[in-house]
Image (cartoon, rainbow, N blue to C red):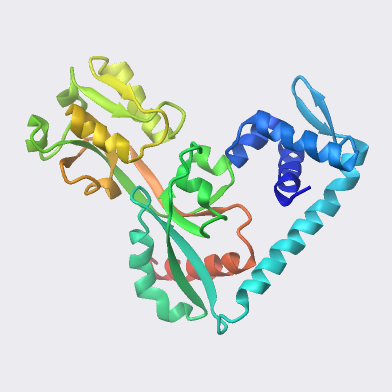
Amino acid sequence: MDISQLQTFIRVSTYGSFTKAGEESFISGTAVMKQINRLENELNLKLFVRTATGTKLTAEGQKFLPYIQQILSLLDTAIDETRKVGLSGQGIITVGTSILHPADPFMEIWKKITAQMSDFQIRIVQLQEDLRSSNREYAMLGKQCDLIVGTFDNTTLKQSFRAFPLGQYNFGIAVRSDNPLAKLSQITFKDLKNQTLISVPLGISEKNDQLRQTIATDFPEINISETNGRYDMNTFNQAVEENVALITLTPWKRIHPNLVSIPLETDVTVPYGILTTKFPGSNVEKFLLEFSKIYKSLNS
């Protein structure tokens, strides 16, 4: 029996489904089921009743649940307290950064308020993409880092994330520098007629889905080329190699030296902010509480 099995047990009890618990953990429902089966075998207990519509705790499972919640809470406390040792009273907050999720928007704010938050120290962590996860860097929250700056919507917040809003990113269209569209100061969907346009699949981003709906309804002549999931560097390389257009966002303007990003004429924007797990630990909770108070005072 290991910690991941216990965490999975709590998720299944919370969501009543192997599939939904798997989405929260960025693994398949089958993998979740195997973890629970193994846990039940090791404990010689029947924790869940399996039905066609989901799962339900047995009497044994209901008795087991509060003890496991207490154990994991105690473990979180132990980790938090241990990390404080030798830090000269400063709370260390790790901020993840990557090409697609740059920490710059947060760091610009931090420079202005660091003197007011002297109890905390920021440590930047370079994130490695988890190519097995549909959410990549998001999957690193709580594992490799405490915070990242990223986009969010209702879909994101239904998963294991919380968001502190910082602003709105704008959509753009990225094309190779020698593409005729690169000469435009602003681009419209009409300009993209009979062009190939790279996009993430439907269902990944609510805001991107809104653009896709406009294209499907009003500009069916645009040929959509869907990626396998969220963007990675191969997506930008594909746009260059095939000389096709790509839906992009504000922080990705300079992601590839051979691509030019042109603002897209649309009212649709994408909210971005500081993302954490739903239960980031007491140190991060304290940091976010202080940060939010100071940030709001700066913008009031």
Residue at (84, 51) in percent of width and height: 66
Q: In this image, 19 relative to 276: left or right?
A: right
Counting from the top left corner in percent of width and height, residue 27 is at: 60, 36
Counting from the top left corner in percent of width and height, residue 258 is at: 15, 42
- The quadrant holding residue 115 is bottom left
Residue at (40, 75) in percent of width and height: 113
* Along the line of sight, the residue nearer the viewer: 239 or 128: 128
* Along the line of sight, the residue nearer the viewer: 256 or 283: 256
Question: Is 79 drawn above or below residue 5 in the view shown?
Answer: below
User: Residue lying furthest bottom in this view?
Assistant: 88
Quarter of the image where the C terminus is located: bottom left
- The quadrant holding residue 35 is top right
Counting from the top left corner in percent of width and height, residue 253 is at: 23, 47
Question: Is 82 drawn above or below residue 50 in the view shown?
Answer: below
Q: In this image, 168 relative to 176: left or right?
A: right
Q: In this image, 33 relative to 107: left or right?
A: right
Residue at (36, 66) in percent of width and height: 107
Number of marks: 0
* Along the line of sight, the residue nearer the viewer: 177 or 38: 38
Residue at (69, 35) in percent of width and height: 32
Question: Is 92 drawn above or below residue 181 in the view shown?
Answer: below
Query: Taking the image as drawn, is residue 266 in sight?
Result: no
